[in-house]
Image (tube, grey):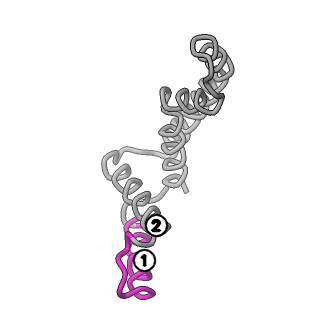
Amino acid sequence: MKTSKQIQDEIDFLKNNFKALYPNRQLLSNIKDGKRIAFLTLCQRYVEMTPSLSDESIRQEIDRLQKRIELISGRLGFYIEEIKKKQSGVSEKSARSSFEKEFDIKGMKRQVKTLKYILQ
């Protein structure tokens, strides 16, 4: 499991390498590194705020979230049909988007990704 110090070391490494490669540019101008640092900062806060984390509790939470995502995604077809019945002219893409937004699928996937990174 990653510690807060390990994550901070990776953040510092990214920042220092960016400054060495691009001394005249801001870190935010490099979208890839900026997003990675934001992700690592989120992971670091997660570790710091929940010091009682264990490998087993993280694995259980990952399993719980993945089962929830599967269960919710299994209802997608029914949801799209209901939306099409209620509103004519709605595309499947917009119905899928509203479904994922309503059940926060993207947030759960991000949480799984964060937990998997911390578990490494």
- Residue with the mark numbered 1: 13
Q: Earlier in the sequence, mark 2 or mark 1?
A: 1
Q: Residue furthest left?
A: 49
Alpha carbon of mark 2 to alpha carbon of mark 1: how far? 16 Å
Compared with 77, 120 (above or below) is: below
| Residue drawn at point x = 41 percent, y = 64 percent | 37
Q: Is residue 32 left or right of residue 24?
A: right
Q: How many marks?
A: 2
- Residue with the mark numbered 2: 31
Residue 80 position, x and y percent, is 64, 20
Instruction: Indicate which disc residue 98 carries.
Output: none
Based on the displayed image, in which of its 4 quarters is residue 8 positioned? bottom left
As for residue 7 lying within the magenta part, the answer is yes
Q: Which image quadrant: the C terminus?
A: bottom right
* In this view, the mark in front (2 or 1): 2
Residue 56 position, x and y percent, is 52, 41
The foreground one among 82 and 22 is: 82
Based on the displayed image, in which of its 4 quarters is residue 52 positioned? top left
The foreground one among 69 and 85 is: 85
Q: The disc labelled 2 sits on which kind of residue?
A: Ile
Q: The disc labelled 1 sits on which kind of residue?
A: Phe
Q: Secondary structure at mark 2?
A: helix
Q: Which residues are magenta?
A: 6-28
